[in-house]
């Protein structure tokens, strides 16, 4: 996986509000790099619950992002999930759906830089991950 990979995690094992295990859609933002053992991936989930009042969000309309099954948003006021990269890449419940373009990733980066849920370390790791795929010129945290 590389930054911008969109994937569907069927039977996502960490439901926020208890109850049934259901599919969730994620965007892979980056990871801790090769010096970390294991390499930890940073992934953010999307939601279809409409624009959250007073939250900083990025709309992801299906017309522009056909990888999603319906219109959704990326809420920057939610903490990203952290998972071992190897476990994500070998998980049979994960289906890769597509890849975001660089402009969309830049918009996501600008959004996460304003979020209180992304530490400086996390932002530095994501900044480095974006640089490694050719997204340069972003403000370093």
Image (spheres, rainbow, N blue to C red):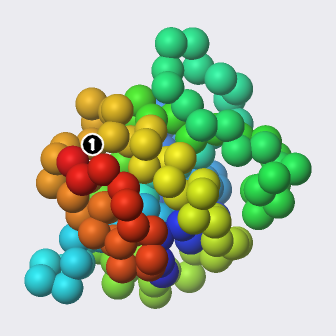
Q: Residue at x 67, y 37 (%)?
A: 59
Q: Residue at x 50, y 54 (%)?
A: 106
Front one among 71 and 23? 71
- Quick check: 44 left or right of 34? right
Q: Which element type, helix, strand or loop, lies under badge 1?
A: loop
Q: Is residue 9 visible?
A: no
- Quick check: 54 left or right of 117? right
Front one among 141 and 22? 141
Place of residue 89 in the rendered image (x, y in percent of width and height, measured from the top left): 46, 83
* Residue 24, placed above or below residue 59: below
Outermost residue to the right:
63
- Quick check: 13 left or right of 34? right
Q: Residue at x 65, y 23 (%)?
A: 51
Place of residue 119 in the rendered image (x, y in percent of width and height, measured from the top left): 19, 44
Q: Is residue 35 visible?
A: yes
* Residue 104, placed above or below residue 77: below
Quarter location, residue 83: bottom left
Q: How many marks?
A: 1
Q: Residue at x 50, y 48 (%)?
A: 108
- Quick check: 109 left or right of 47? left
Place of residue 132 in the rendered image (x, y in percent of width and height, measured from the top left): 36, 79
Q: Residues within 10 Å of mark 1 (few under 14, many from 20)?
A: some
Place of residue 66 in the rendered image (x, y in percent of width and height, measured from the top left): 82, 60
Outermost residue to the front:
137
Front one among 141 and 1? 141
Residue under label 1, please give it. 118
């Amino acid at each position: 996986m590389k930054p911008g990979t969109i994937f569907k995690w069927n039977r996502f094992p960490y439901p926020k509000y208890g109850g049934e295990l259901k599919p969730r859609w994620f965007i892979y933002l980056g990871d801790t790099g090769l010096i970390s053992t294991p390499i930890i991936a940073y992934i953010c989930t999307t939601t279809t619950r409409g624009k959250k009042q007073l939250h900083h969000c990025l709309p992801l309309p299906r017309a522009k992002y056909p990888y999603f099954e319906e219109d959704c948003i990326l809420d920057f006021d939610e903490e990203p999930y952290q998972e071992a990269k190897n476990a994500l890449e070998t998980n049979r419940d994960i289906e890769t759906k597509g890849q975001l373009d660089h402009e969309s990733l830049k918009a996501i980066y600008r959004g996460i830089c304003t979020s209180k849920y992304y530490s400086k370390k996390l932002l530095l790791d994501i900044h480095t991950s974006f640089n490694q795929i050719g997204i340069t010129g972003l403000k370093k945290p």
